[in-house]
Image (cartoon, rainbow, N blue to C red):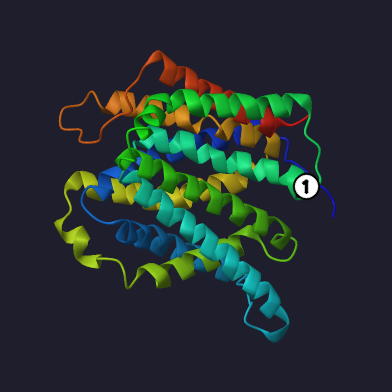
Amino acid sequence: MTAHTLSGRSTYGFVLTLTVCVLWGIFPIAAKSVLLETDPYTLNFYRFSLPSVILWMFLLRRRQLPSLWRGAQRPLLKRVLIASFLLIGNYIFFAFALGHITPSGAQVLIQAGTMMLLLSGVFLFGEQFSTRQWLGCLTFMAGLVSFFFYHILDMFDGFGSYAIGMGLMLLAAVTWAAYAILQKPLLDKISSAQILLVVFALGVVVFLPLADLSAVLSMSISALIGLSFCVLSTLVGTACFAEALAHWEASKISATLTTIPLFTLLFMQVLSRYPGFKISAEPISGLTIFGALLVVCGAGMVAIGKR
């Protein structure tokens, strides 16, 4: 398979990647505001509904709708369905974890999924890590311990709500990494947009009987704005990420995306100063900031690779 040729518009690729960082940095804050007034199933149903319709129309116009139900495609369909359920599981665990953990903590801990994916290349596919990448792993782990140090100490007195949220977020990281591992070989036979269409459509079917569709009628204005942002960030963020890959190196995109927790920390600190803001921010200390920086630096060192 020939290597993908970049457009040469690296600045445009950087702007697209930065847009993804902003959207996904704000997302857990918006999702948390919605979850104050409804449940994770309702949030995910609306997150999947509009993107599935728009993506279906996009692929229909291009005549690229997947035809996985045909006899010869059934083995491929099974793998796509397994990958889809893993990603749906990621969405569920992430949303439930947000009910127990702060948005900043969520974004720091979900970076473990990226680390698991990168390490899978070593343990599953025989790839080689450079010394810098192994140092990046150690830096990442040190960052997690530093960021969650006080919460880890609290666990010795019993598993409270925050500890439950950390466990659920780690499950979200595991299911995302497993999805990405399964998706990688599928991309030789089906596009990422076609896989996402299956994911979104299947998600609508799964969440429809569990969601409270009438909840939007009683939501506050701030929750409705948050829900609208969650839906748009799912669609626009995914589109910007896919477009960025056409203009900028994947290693640089991956390294830039590791800064998302810093965006969440920044937005949380800014928004928490406004009267009436109901979401609790992660208590900021020197150790917390140091830990977040170590997580970002460690993940970036591993993502950039040997170059």
Element under disc 1: loop
On-image quarter of the N terminus:
bottom right
Which residue in the rendered view is the most extreme toward the right? 2
Residue beneath the point at 43% across and 28% down: 148
Residue beneath the point at 54% across and 27% down: 295
Residue 162, placed above or below residue 263: below
Q: For the residue marked with disc 1, what is the amino acid?
A: His
Residue 9, placed above or below residue 68: above
Q: Is residue 292 visible?
A: yes
Residue beneath the point at 45% across and 60% down: 51
Which residue is tagged 1?
A: 4
Q: Quadrant of residue 269?
A: top left
Q: Residue 153: x and y, percent?
A: 38, 27
Q: Residue 12: x and y, percent?
A: 61, 34
Is residue 293 toward the left or the right of residue 282 in the image?
Answer: right
Which residue in the rendered view is the most extreme toward the top? 286
Is residue 153 toward the left or the right of residue 202 in the image?
Answer: left
Residue beneath the point at 54% across and 60% down: 86
CA neighbours of label 1 inside 10 A, class few (<14), some (14 to 19), many (20+): few
Residue 81, placed above or below residue 149: below
Q: Residue 252: x and y, percent?
A: 67, 32
Is residue 21 toward the left or the right of residue 125 in the image?
Answer: left
Which residue in the rendered view is the most extreme toward the front? 157
